């Protein structure tokens, strides 16, 4: 026996094998309601009669899809669908009244037995040959008016047509070869191998190669899909890098010491940043730290300083000046000592009267005394 030559795929349903065939009956791709001649419903029978491998089903000729004995040959092509040893293209020994012969199953039908029907012969009749098992030929001669075998069956092939031989395993199936009608073995082919879509997760199939049989793979980092509980933190490979955020421990391109000191560190002290920090003080950065308080010895007689408390005031506001300079806002009779810009005198004493500085003595004998301790001795007016 051998498997059917159609493209059907066997599926086990209970104790029966059912073949799913591609296309429609008779190999046609027409829809099931076609109206081929001789293929219409006529009360449960088909006229004209169906031709193998088709069978009459519900008034239509259709390819049989039943394989009761599970030998891989559909019932329409099987000469005995109850015996897995008998399929299509099988031969068996048959006997007649005049000897043995063979009969061959072709497309579900047994051919006539080749046993001779003429038993008698006439002396002198030339020898004849008749078919014998395994595609051989048997020579017979006429002896005493009867045909008698001479020798054994000659030219027999390697196997009985339809015989099947199993080989080694192949995937989920088995290597098999079948004997042809010429009594020669075919090449081994893998029968019953598993395939993606057969409903079973077997062989080398995985959820990645055959999710239809094995189910969808569970989410895993590195599978190229950001799914399940994955995110940019737990699986950057699938979900991509997380956007920069202050506090992630990395000073990213959009962050700096001002916007994110926790990642980038504190900014270095800079005069003008409105914060008096680092090495800044009132002297180096009055804009951030404020003006320094008056300090005796800075050369300026400030408001809180006097001749008695600070040497900055002993000579007044030393600088340059001339007779007639304005002194708006200066208390009346305030004295000062300056270097005259007009006469070049080293020092002159002046007083503020009527909003104007007037030179009192071009060469004062005691300018310091007049500035810090005014008396009538200083005033010749």
Image (cartoon, rainbow, N blue to C red):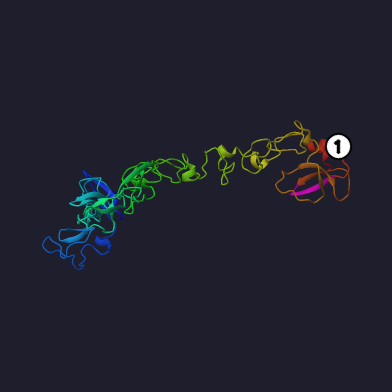
- Quadrant of the image occupied by residue 40: bottom left
Q: Is residue 356 magenta?
A: yes
Q: Is residue 56 above or below residue 257?
A: below
Q: Is residue 367 magenta?
A: no
Circle 1 sits in a helix, a strand or a loop, which is it? Answer: loop
Query: Left of 277 or right of it: where is 8?
Result: left
- 373 or 69: nearer the eye? 69
**Residue 145, how many percent across, how many down?**
21, 54
- 124 or 246: nearer the eye? 124
Q: What residue is rendered at 18% in x and 66% in y?
A: 38
**Residue 62, how many percent across, how many down?**
21, 59
The reply to whether residue 87 is in sight is no
**Residue 80, how many percent across, how many down?**
21, 49
**Residue 186, how many percent across, how many down?**
37, 50
Instruction: Please state the extent of the stretch shown in magenta in the rendering.
Output: 353-360
Q: Which residue is mark 1?
A: 366
Farthest left residue in view: 43
- Quadrant of the image occupied by residue 44: bottom left
Q: Quadrant of the C terminus?
A: top right
- Quadrant of the image occupied by residue 252: top right
Q: Residues within 10 Å of mark 1 (few under 14, many from 20)?
A: few
Q: Main secondary structure of the magenta part?
A: strand
Query: Left of 5 or right of it: where is 350?
Result: right
The reply to whether residue 264 is in sight is yes
- 219 or 320: nearer the eye? 219
Q: Is residue 106 above or below residue 16?
A: below
């Amino acid at each position: 026996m051998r498997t059917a030559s159609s493209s059907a795929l066997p599926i086990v349903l209970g104790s029966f094998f059912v073949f799913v065939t591609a296309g429609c009956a008779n190999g046609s791709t027409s829809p099931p309601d076609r109206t081929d001649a001789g293929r219409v419903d006529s009360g449960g029978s088909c006229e004209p009669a169906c031709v193998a491998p088709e069978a009459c089903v519900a008034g239509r000729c259709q390819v049989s899809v039943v394989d009761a004995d599970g030998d891989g040959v559909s019932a329409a092509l099987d000469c005995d669908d109850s015996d897995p040893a008998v399929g299509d293209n099988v031969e068996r020994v048959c006997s007649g009244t005049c000897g043995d012969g063979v009969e061959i199953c072709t497309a579900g039908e047994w051919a006539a037995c080749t046993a001779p029907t003429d038993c008698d012969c006439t002396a002198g009749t030339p020898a004849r040959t008749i078919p014998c098992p395994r595609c051989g030929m048997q020579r017979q001669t006429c002896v005493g008016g009867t045909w008698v075998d001479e020798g054994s069956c000659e030219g027999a092939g390697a196997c009985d047509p339809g015989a099947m031989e199993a080989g080694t395993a192949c995937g989920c199936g088995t290597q098999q070869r079948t004997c042809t009608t010429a009594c020669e073995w075919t090449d081994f082919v893998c029968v019953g191998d598993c395939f993606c879509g057969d409903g079973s997760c077997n062989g080398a199939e995985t959820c990645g190669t055959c999710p239809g049989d094995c189910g969808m793979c569970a989410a895993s980092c590195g599978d190229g899909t950001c799914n399940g509980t994955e995110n940019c933190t737990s699986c950057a490979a699938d979900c991509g890098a997380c956007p920069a955020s202050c506090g992630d421990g990395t000073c990213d391109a959009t962050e700096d010491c001002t916007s994110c000191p926790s990642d980038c560190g504190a900014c270095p002290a800079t005069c003008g940043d409105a914060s008096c920090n680092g090495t800044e003080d009132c002297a180096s950065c009055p804009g951030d730290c404020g003006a320094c308080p008056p300090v005796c010895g800075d050369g300026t007689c400030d408001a809180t300083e006097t001749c008695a408390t600070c040497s900055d005031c002993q000579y007044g506001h030393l600088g340059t000046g001339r007779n007639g300079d304005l002194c708006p806002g200066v208390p009346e009779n305030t004295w000062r000592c300056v270097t005259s810009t007009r006469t070049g005198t080293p020092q002159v004493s002046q007083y503020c009267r009527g909003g104007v500085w007037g030179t009192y003595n071009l060469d004062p004998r005691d300018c310091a005394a007049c500035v810090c301790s005014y008396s009538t001795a200083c005033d010749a007016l």
